[in-house]
Image: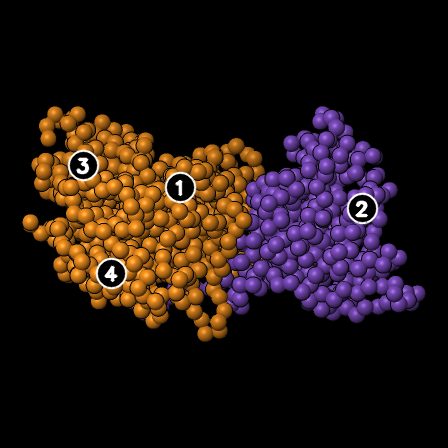
Chain colours: A orange, B purple
């Protein structure tokens, strides 16, 4: 049997709330510490306890981190999903199961490994009864470690990290790992080809989820005010801010330079954020689609009142019940015209963990520079799953606080300024902040009915003048947007445009298209709206451009079509939204489908 | 007239050197005789007499006739006319910017008791340092005379017919929600409005002022509970209220004997003096406050005065242990962690 080394997927089927996430993260982290590129994805139901949940770990020597649709190794711990899990093992794969599950096993094309999880745990009298089920998960970690070659020292390191160095839980769990490994060594005969071997491809990398990265990036951006309301998958962003603020903004006087408020709903969360942004604080809220719907009126007001603030939308499927724990990229068109009346939106589109960090601090600079809400659209897959990443980098530029006038500025201007006056001919006005003691500093904020000096008016000409200035501001905005990321491939006549978390799957799909189908593609990942000029140039260069995204309607495709009507005939939508993270397979097949339509060749 | 003269200040300038004109706003665009205009004037008078710098006040409002009124007082103060029913959240966030400032919010019965009920209740829970005025007239004015949630059962309005619903009692909602200062007044009693405004401004925490403020255009029939005539006939003050600024000594009137006066000490050293206490009302007793409101409902009284006060609860910003410098004046050195912290963070990311 030929060995398959560092190139397969493992899926663990457990019950939600059974404590398996510690075990699964331990496997993920241990493999990462072995230097092998690895990614982990949690597929969980909207439920606290009892429903089936799966955790996928993909090991890829080539560094592909996107979802695969095949699982070579399946670990079945949940009787409720046992039959389905058994059926899902790829031919030639391996099936590990807790042997207290007494269900028929008819497959003969795979290796079958029963594990006496309960018996092994029972033998260890030192484990308190309450912890038996939790620690029991570590038995399959040990069995797997023995069978595929996970370095036990790395497992110890992972447990040490997870339990923050607390010896008692580390020892209890590690003992179970070792018991599982020892049992497997004595009792199981290896009948499958899947093995792990040390590599050096993760050196210097970190492992984090996007929400944590976003929270830390925001703190490095000087975040001062966070208002939020619990909603999956955005909750962990606000919670991470609570976790990291005390450490990162520790002061000798023990006082705080920030506040995090859990609001009564998203209406209040955004209201507080608008209020804080208006008063001069670096303010953010985190939410997901249903919450963003509720925030619409307020962000529309903030657009017209020109209030800087940041909204993180960790996209998911919604509304109401349905698939709230599944990923999506379907809030893009909604966000691009959010608010009633004419509108423009600044939207940042992070594509990996590092960009979640970077856009954490950049979003504040952009919001304050432009005096407008900035939306950062992440998604559940990026926000809640663990990803390998380059380490976070300290912001290379000082904070941009925008055009804010102090008492001294007003003295120099002799109090002569206008809140909505286009003094610099870039559409961006000046502002003052409450607390400014200059007698000419104050102004009255309202929606659209104001003149250049913030005085109330319903005059038609003044209204229109202000609307045109706002439009100009969003032309100015283009220069402040993060530029797209471009992957070139010399001589390619075909291109892919995408955004967000699909990048890893697209990189893999491009390799497959090139290697298996002879199709070379260039790839541009959009990182912001409004589109910067580089996007325009890119679209113009190719015969056909595939727009890949995780939604039904091809939302980026539509926005590009509106922006570049002269290129519409080249644009092809490859949109797919079933709640699962993008896979190279559907991207490749989606492109091949439309590629045939146009060219008639592969 | 204020009971106590300002000591040592020229006749037309207060202790911070400002004339009453420095507290004015734009000319009102509300109807002539509107109760809201009378309240705006009392805000101007109270702020002038309290020697407050307008730059230290921030004005907030929602949407409606009442919410327009912050433009009619204190032009030198920042203001934010926000969304319908959403004044509390805007004020909550904004007041973190500089907590040395004091907020005056003006809302209406539609803005607070209907669309804004949720935010109203939650801003009480949080005890935001904020004077929350409800100019309560029982109708929607700007949309021309629909019933509001505070309209009494059976109220008949021209185009609307008869109101079939029970009214919301804003003061009761406030007390139940643990507001730390709750008062009711009547725009037809400007002296009381002004004294309550001063006391509310001195209060540490949320101060709810439910002021019956008649709508002369849509709801001012003599038998309507939010009319001038009804208010004049039915007002039952719990006491005579005077606000005594910290620097002024309390001068008791000679004829006042013990038991006839109650003093409430404010955290800033000022004092609320309550006189004519034949009802023996104690505004620091929450149980009595609820009883007084229940009685008012039962007997159709317009009970006015300081209904409840608790000076001892921490305000929202106090619970956050914030630095002394206003947050909106902090510079990059205070806000961006030092470069070496990035290594520490990366080390935590496994």
Instruction: Give the side of residue B202 with respect to residue B11, left or right.
Output: left
Residue indicated by mark 1: A324
* The one of A566 and A214 positioned closer to us in this rendering: A214
Q: Which residue is mark 2?
A: B296
Mark 4 or mark 1, whichever is nearer to me = 4
Q: Mark 4: few, some, or many residues within 10 Å (few <14, many ≥20)?
A: many
Counting residues from the start of the chain, the first of labels 4 and 3 encountered is 4
Structural distance between the alpha carbons of marks 1 and 3: 27 Å
The vertical placement of A220 against B212, above or below, is below
Disc 2 packing (10 Å; few <14; some 14–19; many ≥20): some
How far apart are the two marked residues, 4 and 1, measured between alpha carbons? 35 Å
Q: What distance separates the C-alpha of mark 4 from that of mark 2?
A: 73 Å
First along the sequence among labels 4 and 1: 4
- Residue depicted at 49% across the width and 73% down the height: A253
Chain where mark 4 sits: A
Q: Is residue A361 left or right of residue B229?
A: left
Q: Which chain letter matches label 2?
A: B
Q: Determine the residue located farthest toward the right in the rendered image.
A: B255
The residue that mark 3 highlights is A588
x then y, percent, for residue B118: 60, 45
Chain containing the residue with disc 1: A
Disc 1 element: loop
Please count the marks in the image: 4
């Amino acid at each position: 049997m030929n060995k398959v080394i560092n190139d397969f997927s493992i899926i663990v089927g457990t019950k939600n709330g059974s404590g398996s996430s510690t075990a699964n993260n331990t496997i993920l982290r241990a493999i990462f510490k072995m230097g092998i590129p690895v990614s982990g994805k949690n597929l969980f139901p909207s439920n606290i306890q009892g429903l089936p949940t799966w955790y996928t770990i993909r090991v890829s020597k080539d560094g592909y981190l996107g979802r695969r649709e095949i699982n070579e190794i399946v670990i079945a711990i949940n009787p409720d999903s046992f039959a389905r899990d058994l059926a899902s093992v790829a031919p030639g794969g391996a099936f590990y199961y807790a042997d207290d599950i007494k269900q028929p096993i008819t497959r003969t094309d795979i290796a079958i490994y029963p594990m006496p999880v309960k018996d092994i745990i029972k033998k260890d009298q030192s484990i308190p009864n309450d912890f038996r089920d939790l620690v029991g998960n570590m038995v399959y970690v040990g069995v797997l470690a023995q069978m595929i070659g996970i370095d036990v020292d790395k497992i110890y390191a992972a447990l040490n990290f997870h339990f923050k160095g607390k010896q008692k839980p580390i020892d209890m769990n590690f003992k179970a790992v070792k018991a599982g490994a020892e049992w497997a060594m004595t009792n199981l005969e290896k009948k499958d080809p899947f093995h792990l071997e040390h590599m050096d491809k993760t050196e210097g990398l970190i492992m984090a989820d996007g929400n944590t990265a976003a929270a830390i990036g925001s703190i490095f951006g000087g975040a001062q005010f966070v208002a939020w309301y619990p909603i999956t998958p955005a909750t962990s962003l606000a919670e991470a801010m609570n976790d990291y603020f005390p450490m990162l903004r520790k002061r000798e006087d023990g006082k705080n330079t920030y506040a995090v408020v859990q609001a009564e709903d998203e209406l209040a969360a955004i209201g507080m954020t608008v209020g804080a942004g208006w008063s001069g604080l670096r303010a953010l809220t985190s939410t997901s689609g249903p919450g963003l719907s509720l925030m619409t009126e307020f962000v529309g007001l903030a657009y017209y009142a020109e209030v800087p603030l940041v909204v993180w939308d960790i996209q998911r499927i919604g509304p109401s019940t349905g698939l709230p724990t599944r990923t999506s990229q379907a809030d893009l068109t909604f966000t691009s015209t959010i608010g009633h009346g004419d509108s423009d939106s600044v939207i940042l589109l992070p594509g990996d963990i590092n960009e979640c960090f970077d856009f954490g601090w950049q979003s504040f600079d952009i919001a304050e520079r432009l005096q407008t809400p900035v939306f950062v659209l992440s998604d559940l897959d990026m926000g809640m799953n663990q990803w390998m990443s380059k380490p976070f980098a300290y912001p290379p530029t000082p904070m941009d606080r925008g055009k804010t006038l102090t008492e001294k500025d007003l003295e120099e201007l002799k109090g002569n300024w206008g809140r909505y006056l286009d003094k610099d001919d870039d559409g961006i006005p000046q502002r003052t902040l409450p607390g400014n003691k200059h007698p000419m500093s104050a102004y009255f904020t309202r929606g659209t009915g104001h003149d250049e000096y913030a005085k109330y008016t319903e005059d038609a000409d003044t209204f229109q003048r202000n609307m045109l200035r706002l439009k100009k501001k969003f032309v100015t905005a283009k220069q402040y947007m993060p530029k797209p990321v471009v992957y070139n491939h010399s001589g390619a006549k075909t291109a892919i445009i995408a955004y967000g978390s699909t990048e890893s799957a697209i990189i893999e799909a491009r390799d497959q298209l090139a290697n298996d189908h002879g199709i070379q593609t260039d790839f541009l990942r959009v990182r912001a709206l409004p589109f910067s000029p580089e996007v325009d140039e890119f679209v113009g260069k190719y015969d056909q451009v595939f727009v890949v995204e995780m939604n039904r309607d091809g939302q980026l495709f539509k926005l590009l079509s509106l922006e570049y009507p002269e290129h519409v005939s080249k644009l092809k939508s490859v949109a797919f939204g079933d709640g699962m993270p993008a896979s190279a397979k559907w991207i490749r097949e989606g492109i091949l489908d439309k590629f045939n339509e146009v060219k008639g060749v592969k | 007239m204020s009971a106590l003269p300002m000591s040592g200040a020229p006749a037309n300038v207060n202790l911070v050197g400002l004339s009453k004109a420095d507290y004015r706003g734009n000319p009102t665009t509300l109807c002539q005789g509107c109760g809201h205009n009378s309240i705006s004037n009392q805000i101007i008078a109270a702020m002038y007499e309290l020697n407050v710098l307008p730059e230290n006040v921030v004005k907030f409002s929602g949407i409606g006739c009442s919410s327009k009124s912050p433009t009619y007082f204190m032009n030198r103060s920042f203001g934010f006319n926000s969304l319908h029913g959403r004044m509390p959240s805007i004020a909550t966030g904004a007041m973190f910017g500089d907590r040395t400032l004091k907020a005056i919010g003006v809302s209406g019965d539609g803005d607070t008791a209907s669309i804004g009920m949720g935010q109203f209740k939650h801003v009480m829970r949080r005890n935001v340092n904020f004077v929350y005025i409800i100019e309560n007239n029982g109708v929607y004015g700007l949309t021309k005379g629909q019933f509001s949630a505070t309209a009494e059962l059976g109220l008949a309005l021209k185009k609307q017919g008869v109101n079939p619903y029970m009214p919301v009692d804003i003061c009761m909602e406030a007390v139940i929600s643990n507001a730390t200062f709750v008062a009711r007044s009547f725009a037809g009693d400007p002296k009381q409005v002004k004294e309550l405004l001063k006391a509310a401004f001195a209060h540490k925490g949320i101060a709810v002022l439910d002021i019956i403020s008649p709508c002369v255009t849509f709801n001012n029939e003599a038998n309507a509970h939010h009319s001038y005539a009804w208010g004049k006939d039915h007002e039952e003050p719990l006491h005579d209220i005077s606000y005594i600024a910290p620097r002024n000594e309390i001068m008791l009137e000679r004829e006042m004997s013990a038991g006839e006066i109650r003093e409430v000490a404010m955290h800033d050293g000022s004092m609320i003096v309550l006189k004519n206490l034949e009802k023996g009302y104690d505004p620091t007793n929450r149980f009595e406050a609820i009883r007084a409101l229940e009685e008012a409902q039962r007997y159709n009284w317009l009970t006015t005065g300081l209904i409840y006060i608790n000076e001892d609860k921490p305000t929202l910003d106090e619970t956050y242990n914030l630095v002394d410098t206003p947050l909106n004046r902090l510079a990059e050195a205070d806000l961006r962690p030092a470069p070496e912290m990035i290594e520490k963070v990366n080390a935590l990311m496994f």
